[in-house]
Image (cartoon, rainbow, N blue to C red):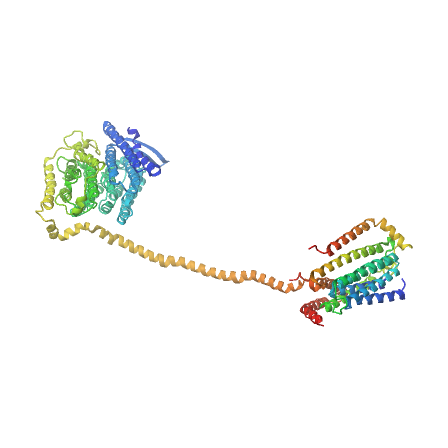
Amino acid sequence: MTEFSFLIPLLPLFSFVMIIFFLRWKEMLSAVFSIVMILAAWVMSIIVLIETIARHGDNYEAFYKFVDLPNFVLEIGVLIDPLTAIMLVVVTTVGACVEIYSVGYMHNDPRFSRFFAYLSLFLFSMLGLVVANNFFMIFIFWELVGLTSYLLIGFWFEKKSAADACKKAFITTRMGDLGFLVGLFIIGIYFGTFNYLRVFDIAGSGMIPAGILTAAAIFVFCGAVGKSAQWPLHVWLPDAMEGPTPVSALIHAATMVAAGVYLVARSMPLFVTSGDASMVVAIIGLITSFIAASIGLVQNDIKRVLAYSTVSQLGYMIMALGLYGYDHFHGQHSPGFYAGTFHLYTHAFFKGLLFLGAGSVIHAVHTNDIQEMGGLGRKMKKTALTFMIASLSIAGIFPLSGFWSKDEIVAAASHHPVFFIGTLTIAFMTAFYMWRLCFLTFFGEPRDQHRYDHAHESPNNMTYPLIFLAVLSVCAGWVGVPYLSHGFASFVFHDEAYHPHPNYLLWAVSTIVGGGGIILAYLMYYKKSISADAMANRFKRIYKLLYNKWYFDEIYQKILIDPVMSIASFMWKFDANVIDGAVNGTGWLTIKWSDIKEWFDTWIVDGAVNGTGWIVRQGANILRFLQTGSMQFYALFIAALVVLFGIYRFETSMMEGDEPIFTIGFIIAVVLLAVAAKLLQGRPQTDRQAESEE
Amino acid sequence: MLFYLSLAAVLFAVGLFGVLTRRNTIGILMSLELMFNAANINFVAFNKYVWADGLIGQMFAVFIVVVAAAEAVVGLAIVLLLYRNWQGIDTDHVSVMKW
Amino acid sequence: MAEPGIVFWILAVVTVASAVMVVTLKNIFHCALALILCLFSVAGIYILLNAEFLAAAQVLIYVGAVAILMIFAIMLTSNLASKAIRQSNEQVMVGTVVSVLFCGGMLALIYLTDKAIVSEETGVAFWRQVRGTLPADNVASLGGYLMTKFMLPFEVVSVLLLAAMIGAIVLARKEKA
C-alpha cells in the first residue's frame, strides 16, 4: 500500500474536482462524496502507517523527474518515513472528523457544496505537503495551503471582518513565505538539489559553510514562522477565527499551522548543523508561546482564546524542536525532537476537539463571547464533557495525551533554565485560561438567559466526531509513554532513537503547575473567591496590555502599515499628480491637437471638398441658364460653335498675331448677346399680353 | 460655279437665321426647307461643274427631296400634336425641358 | 467657265429675297407664300444647272406637296394666320450675327478654296475642270440609275416614306378618349 501512497493526496483532489464540476448542485451528495474520499485516504494512511511500522521506520521514496536538466532536477514524488506516516494519519483523522462535523455545522449554508470542495482542496494541499519528497514540491503545496486557507477563512466573505481576516492571513503568511523562498534559493544554489535526503546528506557532510547553513535554516524557518503563526507573524491566526469553526479546527489547530512545525521537524537535519539557527528557532518559539498564552488569559472570544492557545502550543513545539537542534549541535542528547513531534501529534487531536466543541457551543448559542455564556454544561452534556477532557489534556493532567507530550517538552527544556521556567509558566497559564474558558462556558449561572434558553445539544453528526476525538485526546498519548520500549520515541526520531525514561520529579512539577492553573481558574471563575475584576483592576496596565494583545496589531499598524500606507499615499499622490498629470497632459495635448486637426478638417479639408461642391453648384447655377429647354437656343449654339471654329481656323492660319482676338471677341459677343437674349426672355409674356390686348 | 455656291451659302444662312429666330414652329420648318434647298443647289452645281459622271449629285438631291418631304410630313404631324397639347405652336410653349 | 447669265442673277435675287421674306415676315401665311416663290426660283436654278428632273420634282413635291401641306398645317393649327404678330423670338440679334458670320465664313471658304486648290498643270482650281460629261437625256439616265445603281437606296427611301407616313398618322391621330 505504501507504493500507492501518492494516491492519498489525490483522493481529496478528485473529490474537489468532482464537487466543483459535477456535484455542486447536489449538496448532500457532494458532502458524502468528499467524506468518503477522506475516509478512504484515512484508511490508506493507517495502512501506510502500519506498513511503515512493519518496516521499522525505513524510508520509502518514489519520485518522478518532471524537470530533468543536466545540473538541475525537479522531482515530484513521495517520501514516506515515520514522521510522514504519523502526519498523514493525523491530517486525515482530523480532516475526516471535521468533514463529518461540518455536515451538521454548515447545514443551510448557501455555499454548502463549495465548503466541502474547499475542504477537499485543503486536504489535498496538506497531504501533498506532507508526502512531498523535496523542498520545491513542499513549497508548491505550502502555497496551495495558503490559498485554501485564504478561501476558507474568507468563506463568509460577505462579512467585512472575514474578508479582512483572510487578506490579513494571506498577506502575513506571505511574509514568511518570502523568507522560505529565499531559503529555497539558497538550498537550490548551494546544495544543487531540492530532494530532502540529498540536501540533508550534503548538509551533514560539512561541505557547506556554516554561515550558509545558518542562513538556509533561518530562512526556511521563516516559512514556518508565517505558517505556524509564530511571533512576530502570529497576528493573523486569531483574526482567522472569522472563518467557519470547522475551518478553524482543521486549519488552525490540527493541520495547516502544524505545517510549520512539520517543516521544522522535516528539516531538522538542516537545523542541527547550525546551533545559532536552532537557538533562534527556540527563542522565537518561547517568545511566541509566552506572548500568546498571556494574551489568552484575558480574551473573551471563545475562539480567540483557542487561537492564542494554538499559537502558544505551536510555539511550544517550535521551541522544543529548536532546543533539540541546539542540543544536538552541541552533542547532547535531547528529547526535543521527539517531544515536538509528539506534541504536534497529540495537540492535533485535542485542539481539534476544542475547536469543534467551541463550534458546537457557538452553534448552540450563536455568539463567541464567553461572557454571554455560562451553565451550558447542563444543556450540552456531550459537548461539555468532551471539551473538558480536551482541556484537561491540554493542561497536561495525568494520564491524558497532553500530559505525555507536554512533559517531554518540559523535559527537553529542563537543561536550559530560562526555557524551563518559561515552559512551566506557559503550562500554568495554559491550564488557567483553558479552565477559565471551561468554567465560564459550562458552569455557573447563565449570564444571558435568552441565549441559554435557546441552547441545545448539537446533532449526532457533530457530537460523534467530538466523542471520537475525545477518545483520541485521552488515548493518543499512550503510544509515547516512557514505559514502552518501542513507543513513539523509537519510531519518530532524528539521527538516533531517544529512549525516554520516567522522570517522576518532572511529572510532579508539571502536574502541580497544571493543577495550580486549574485551581486558580476554579477559584476565580467558579467559586468567585478571588474576584477577576479586582485582579484586572489591580493589574490594570498588564490587563490592558494583554487584553489588547500586547498592542501588536497597533504596533504593526504604526510601524509597518502606516509607513507603507503613507508611502503608498505619497506614491498615489505622485501617481495622481505627476504620472496622471503626464498622462492627462498627453491626453490634453492629444485633444487639443485633434481639435486643431478637427478645425483643419472642418475648414480646410471639408472646405476643399465642400468648396468643390460649392463651385460645382454655383457653376451649375450659372450654367443651368444654358439649359433653356429652347431648341432654338441649342441650335444657336451649334451654329455659333461652327462659326467659332471657322473663325479660329481662319485666324490662326491666315492672319498674323499670337492672340486669336477675333475668336475671343466673337465668343464675348455671342455670350453677351445670348445673356441679353435670355434677360429679355420674360418679355414674350408681356408682349403676348400686350398683343392680345390689341 | 462660285456664284451657285455663293447663292447656296446665302440661302443656307438665311434658313439658319430663320431656324434660330422664328417663334412659330411651322416657320422653323419652312426655314429648314430653305436649308435643304441650299444643300440641293450645291449638289446639283457640283454635279454639273465638277463630277458629271453618273449623275451622283442629282441622285443625292433627289433623295434629299424625298427625305425632306418625309421630314415635312412628320414635322407637321408633330406640329399638329403640339397644337393639340398646348393650344399653340410657338417654341416658347415647348421649352419644358429647361432647368 | 462662263459668267452666269442674267437669268441666274434674276433667279438668285428672287430666291434670296423670297427666302429673307420667309424668315422675316410677320404673317406666317405670307411666309408660306414666299416659300413657294423661293422654291420656284430654286427650281429655276436647277434647270440652269441641267437638272430638269430635279426641277420638276422640286415643283411637284415642294411646291405642290410640302408647301400646300404647310399651308394646311397653318390653317389647321393656328388662328393667328391673319394676325400680324411678331414672329421672331428674342434671339434675333445674336441669330443675325451668327447667321451673317456663318454666311461670311462659308463665302470666304468658297473663295479661299477656289484660290487655294490650284492645279499645277493648268493654273486654275482643279474643281473647275469637269470630269466626265453630263448625259444629254438627264431624266432617262436618272431613271436608269435609280433602277440599277441606286436600287437599294431607292427601296430604302420608299420604306422611309412609308415609315414617315405611318409616323405622321400615328402622331396626328386623335387620342381615343
In the image, residue C72 sits, relative to residue A475, either above or below, namely below
Q: Position of residue A475 (x, y in %)?
A: 17, 33
Q: Position of residue A123 (x, y in %)?
A: 28, 37
From this viewpoint, is residue C126 visible? no
* Left or right, residue A430 beside residue A132: left
Q: Name which quarter of the figure residue A108 lies in.
A: top left
Q: Position of residue A455 (x, y in %)?
A: 18, 43
Q: Name which quarter of the figure residue A350 lies in.
A: top left
Residue located at (31% from left, 56% from top): A569
Q: Name which quarter of the figure residue A493 lies in.
A: top left
Of residues A299 and A231, the one nearer the viewer is: A299
Single out the residue that lies furthest toward the right.
Answer: C136
Of residues A260 and A610, the one nearer the viewer is: A610
In this rendering, the count of numbered labels is 0
Single out the residue that lies furthest toward the front.
Answer: C177
Position of the C terminus of chain A, as image quadrant, is bottom right
Of residues C37 and A510, the one nearer the viewer is: C37
* Left or right, residue C129 beside residue A269: right
Q: Position of residue A263 (x, y in %)?
A: 25, 39
* Left or right, residue C13 beside residue A603: right
Position of the N terminus of chain A, as image quadrant, is top left
From this viewpoint, is residue C50 visible? yes
Residue located at (69% from left, 60% from top): B85
In the image, residue A287 sits, relative to residue B20, either above or below, namely above
Single out the residue that lies furthest toward the top.
Answer: A54
